[in-house]
Image (cartoon, grey):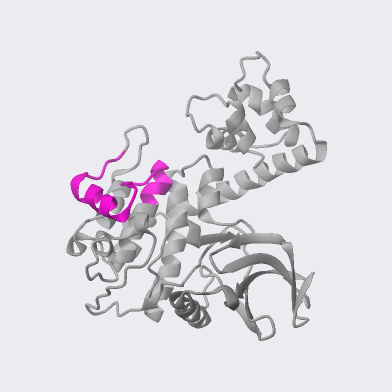
Amino acid sequence: MIKIQNKYSYSEEDLIGEGAYSKVYKGLFDKTNEFVAVKVIDWSKVKDKYYISGFQREVRILRDLDHENIVKIIDMIHDPCLNREYLIMEYCDSQNLTNFINQSGGLLNENVSKIVLQQLLTALNELIKKEYLHRDIKPENILIHKRTLKLADFGFSVKADYSGNQLFRENVGTPLYMAPQILENKHYSVKSDIWSIGVMTYQMIFGEYPWVADDPAQLLKSIKSQKLYFPSHISISDDFKEFIKKCLQYEEKDRYNWDDLIEHKIFKNKYVIQKNYTKIEHLQESINQIRQLQKKRGTPLEQLFTNLDMDGDKKLTFEEFQVLLLYVDNRMEINIQKGIFYRYNVSKNNLLNFNEFSRIFC
């Protein structure tokens, strides 16, 4: 174990993420034995002056924010001997939203997406109060801890006046989520983050991006020339379509403002959101039970699949798959059973193939 001033410790085997100049490890706060995330920056390897200013800005902003839906900074320690910085942050136990989407079969239904958006907008509302613009909203920058979303990565964030007409020029962010004004190297406003939310929402619902291209110039061309398309095989409400459309208006003047977004009618039915959030909790608990049982028994997945495949057609019907679920918990509710089955039935043909079955145990 590597010790940091006898306060924190981590092992290099517990790597949970890395960037160009940093690595993030799962560590421990020695006094309480609580998990923390330890971000290690080796300054001797940093050649990019923008990275240094971005890091300093991120630390300054995180210290100014204290909210349930924003990842917390706990401590920062400099080691002059090794020329390293240790950023101690809140540990999130479920990686990020991208992982969650992938584990859910590559897309989320409307109600789950509402829950994600509601928590994200709660975090962004706090940024608005403190006058910060994030500028890199995407699923990879939304962490999950105990089923609570945590907005992270403030390296591109900047002070912003939401009440006026402040404009920005820096070309920052992730191209697929960038507003067209940024892609065009034009001035843009605080509405640029609203475009990113629209792209992310589309991605959650449909499992793909609204526009794709090999480079930013081609992406801008696609946005200009291709009308926003909603795949017909996935049904969503008119209110949700309107939400996505108004977030993805090319001209900023036609795009939703922040009040429109936060007060949108899709968030009015809080009972439905809470009810479905409870269902998600139970669903995840049941999936974890299946994984734990498989780990304990050690039966190869191929053998388990074959045992369940009663008719030998190399596909599992719901009834065949149900045998495993009831073995795990014979009191499991039918809606939870079906929720697990259809979450992993990516092909939407009511039959689990081996690849889909295997993803349950990832």
Q: Could you say where residue 137 lies in the image, as x and y percent from the top left?
A: 41, 62
Q: Residue furthest top?
A: 311
Q: Is residue 192 visible?
A: yes
Q: Residue furthest right?
A: 297
Q: Could you say where residue 282 lies in the image, as x and y percent from the top left?
A: 62, 46
Q: Toward the viewer: 297 or 268?
A: 297
Instruction: Please check the rendered image and state whether residue 108 is part of the magenta-colored stretch, yes or no.
Output: no
Instruction: Using the rendered view, name the quadrant where residue 321 is placed.
Output: top right
Residue at the image position 25 percent from the left and 59 percent from the top:
180
Q: Could you say where residue 99 lies in the image, as x and y percent from the top left?
A: 55, 50
Residue at the image position 74 percent from the left and 25 percent from the top:
303
Establish if 57 lies above or below 231: below
Q: Could you say where residue 87 lies in the image, as x and y percent from the top left?
A: 61, 76
Residue at the image position 32 percent from the left and 33 percent from the top:
232
Q: Toward the viewer: 245 or 51?
A: 51
Q: Toward the viewer: 227 or 322?
A: 227
Instruction: Please check the rendered image and state whether residue 224 is part of the magenta-colored stretch, yes or no.
Output: yes
321 relative position to 117: left or right = right
Residue at the image position 81 percent from the left and 40 percent from the top:
296
Q: Is residue 268 visible?
A: no
Q: Which residues are magenta?
A: 201-230
Establish if 121 lies above or below 354: below
